[in-house]
Amino acid sequence: MTMSTRSGAAFSTPGFLGDDPYPAYRDARSRCPVVHDPVLNAYAVTRYEDVAEVLADPATYSSLLAVPMYPDNSPAVREALGTEVLDDPGLYMVVADPPDHRALKGHGTALISRERVESLKPKIVARAVRLVDRFVADGRVELVSAFADRLAYGTLCDLLGLPEEMRERSRGQVDMALCLIDPTARPERKLAGATAVREWYTEIRELVSARAQHPEDDMLSELAGTGQSVQAWAYVQSLLGAGIYTTRHLIAGVVHTLLQPEHRPHWERLIASPAAAPALVEEYLRRDAPHRGLNRLATRDVRLGGVRIEAGSTVLPLVGSANRDEMVFPAPDRFDPGRRNIRMHLALGRGIHACVGARLARMEAVTALEVLSRNLPTARLQADFVPRYVPSPYFRGLERLDLGW
């Protein structure tokens, strides 16, 4: 694998999307920490200091291009989406800059308040136990689909107030919505995704209207009751699109790490003391962030990491690389939940775009470890299991996790 020089030869896109991007990241940090990749059409940023600078300066690095929204799709896909979806006036927090972002972030933080998250704890525990009860007698499980995804999605549905009869259908619609913003998705999948998203949009709008008339104790009712119903679609799509995958990958990834032979002592300590779970989750976030990073748009000519970047260029801060920067985290490849600076990682963002659901994601992951270690203490990786990661430009996580006990 070859990496570029600062003159502009390609950063290794296959390495970036591969099962183990960390050698490529390490080489980039040492030789070309800010480098343009023609495949990504972006300047990849790999050192902690530079990534933190990008995240902390929204005036210079706009979030307008954080996620390529629907206009980037073909005319056929846009036609299938329909004008109602394309012209929806809702604002997406992830692509908003100040001053719009300030109001969106404030309202989003209120919707996912500490009190609301804490109130979900009993439901999260109960769901985790129910999920384990379904497969504990089998002696084996594929944990991503049978546990991690179901726990993450079910929790978000509870938070939103999504009715049970909508949940199974909506789960597939979330996947289809994401393919519309994935530059690697096939055209036929994007077309199918547009149809699914249009149906999903109509269902959510109808549900919000119903909650305006008959409110319940959930986010959708609060949106409808506070004059924010126009934001409902943006909040639902953003919350599910971001929250399912990052939390699913976090849960499966930390379990996979702890069950590897070299890390098994941490699993045994977790069994003996569930209070160890938060530090284990935090170090996993640091060592193997489930979110790769989102694009930024340079609003002016700027120098970053010694490289001149012109206004209008796309910049991609790679948080997974920043979190393994040797200048910040000694022995960065080592899994060490006792690190003094463990909370300095950037896995959940920094600055105005720090994840509003971070508290909920941490709670779900900690709960998952507590429940799994208590109920499956002898769990192990299947002998023939080979980790494979989803080839996503946005997320890093296992496609599956095969366990036995």
Image (cartoon, grey):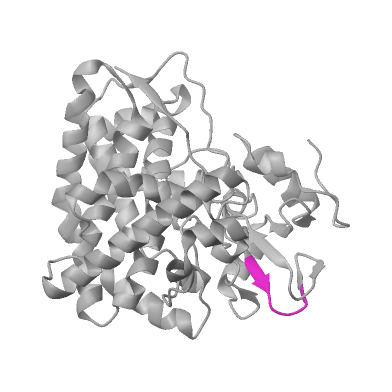
Above or below: residue 247 compared with residue 116: above
Residue 87 point in image, percent of width and height: 47, 74
Q: Residue at x 29, y 76 (%)?
A: 229
Which quarter of the figure has residue 181? bottom right
Q: Quadrant of the N terminus?
A: top right
Q: Is residue 69 visible?
A: no
In the image as oriented, which residue stretches furthest toward the right?
Answer: 7
Q: Residue at x 15, y 49 (%)?
A: 123
In magenta stretch: residue 71: no
Q: Residue at x 18, y 49 (%)?
A: 164
Above or below: residue 254 compared with residue 94: above
In the image as oriented, which residue stretches furthest toward the bottom?
Answer: 99
Above or below: residue 116 compared with residue 187: below
Residue 193 point in image, percent of width and height: 47, 50
Q: Which residues are magenta?
A: 296-302
Residue 342 point in image, percent of width and height: 46, 53
